[in-house]
Amino acid sequence: MHIVGGVLLLAAILAVAEAVKNAAGLMIPAPVLAIVILVFGLFMLRRVPSGLRLVADFLLWHMALFFIPALVAMVALSDVLAQTLWPLLAIIVVSTIIPLWLTAWVFARLAPPLEDADDKPEGGA
Amino acid sequence: MSIINLPDLPGLEGALWIALTLALYALFSRLRAALGGNGLAQPLLWVSAILIAVLVLGDIELARYDRGGDWLLVLLALSTVSIGVPIYDNFPIIRQAAGAFLLAMAIGSVSAVAVALAMAHLMQLDAAIFATLSTKSITSPLAFGVTSEIGGLPALAMGVVIITGNFGVLVGPKLFALTKLHDERAQGLAYGVAAHGIGTAEAIRKSSLMGSFAGLSMGLNGVLTSIILPYVISVS
């Protein structure tokens, strides 16, 4: 029943997010809105229900698997890609490396050092 | 992908596509573990490449693969929601560095779009591709809506975001090792901004802390950029 409860929670929150999104005409995707609702709910509850923890750990660990259909769908793009593949790849390479480095560098410069491990709440995976 | 509109039952063909996808994923996950977590052995990249090759060589329509694939996309939506759990777990650590978080995120996000647009301009790519590239800093489901709003090509936006994510995950570990940026918070934040959902999926595997920073920066950056971008494009 643990697992059912966890999936139920995630699905229910996602459904609420879809409803809110439609009602308010937001452009935010429902799953992103659902993250906000979930975090808010967990703060109200002050703990992570064990069933939710179980399901979330599994789903997060295998998240790359669930991206596969999105990647396979690029097959439909072959015409556009054939025309501009090399310029696009060059742009993607440069415009990924620079922000990846810059973001991490700026944060590492500015952020206070991580406090001791005993302050850390118990993590998931 | 809406959970309210459940896809049709997969049927024999859909079930076979799910089975093939899972079998390849299991195989490449093993391979990756055997290679000591080598960054080049990304199951997502290789499995997708093989499946694309099967579809192209077999002259099979994407809709047929999607009879199985749609089920995995339902799980993608649920796993995206799950990012809320590590964000809650690590909230005290995130709050402690909130200022640095927001500033680094903003600088990273602007640099991604600026570099992409400057290069597109120099290469004289056409206007639709230019508009598409400006959504580069937004996670894929968001990019889709925003791109059509500003006159780009939504399918290409998805493709660009996904290739970006894969590339970010490929070079990330080497880049951070070379530049001696070992702070897990900084790496997670960077993956979320520059490599989106795929970067977040990778960060969560490394640690809950890295994953929570990635998930938060992906969501926040995506939402902020998609609110601001249509205004910027209409002004310029």
Image: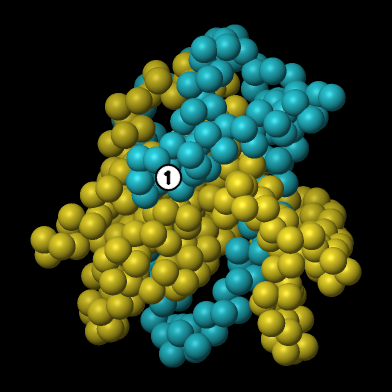
Q: Is residue B14 visible?
A: yes
Q: Colour of chain B?
A: yellow
Q: Is residue B231 above or below residue B156?
A: above
**Residue found at the far left of this picture:** B235
The location of residue B33, given as percent across then percent down, is: 80, 51
Instruction: State the quadrant of the C terminus of chain B.
Output: bottom left
Q: Is residue A41 left or right of residue B63?
A: left
Q: Which residue is mark 1?
A: A22
Labels in figure, total: 1
Return the residue nearer the eye: B8 or B87. B8
Return the residue nearer the eye: B113 or B233. B233
Please tell me in which quadrant of the rendered image residue B64 appears. Answer: bottom right
**Dot 1: chain letter:** A
Please tell me in which quadrant of the rendered image residue B152 appears. Answer: bottom left
Instruction: State the quadrant of the N terminus of chain B.
Output: bottom right
The location of residue B205, given as percent across then percent down, is: 67, 41
Figure coloring = by chain
Q: Mark 1 belongs to which amino acid? A: Asn
Q: Is residue A3 left or right of residue A75?
A: right
The location of residue B146, given as percent across then percent down, is: 34, 59
Q: Colour of chain A?
A: cyan
Q: Is residue A96 above or below residue B222?
A: below
Please tell me in which quadrant of the rendered image residue A110 appears. Answer: top left
Q: Is residue B116 above or below residue A66?
A: below
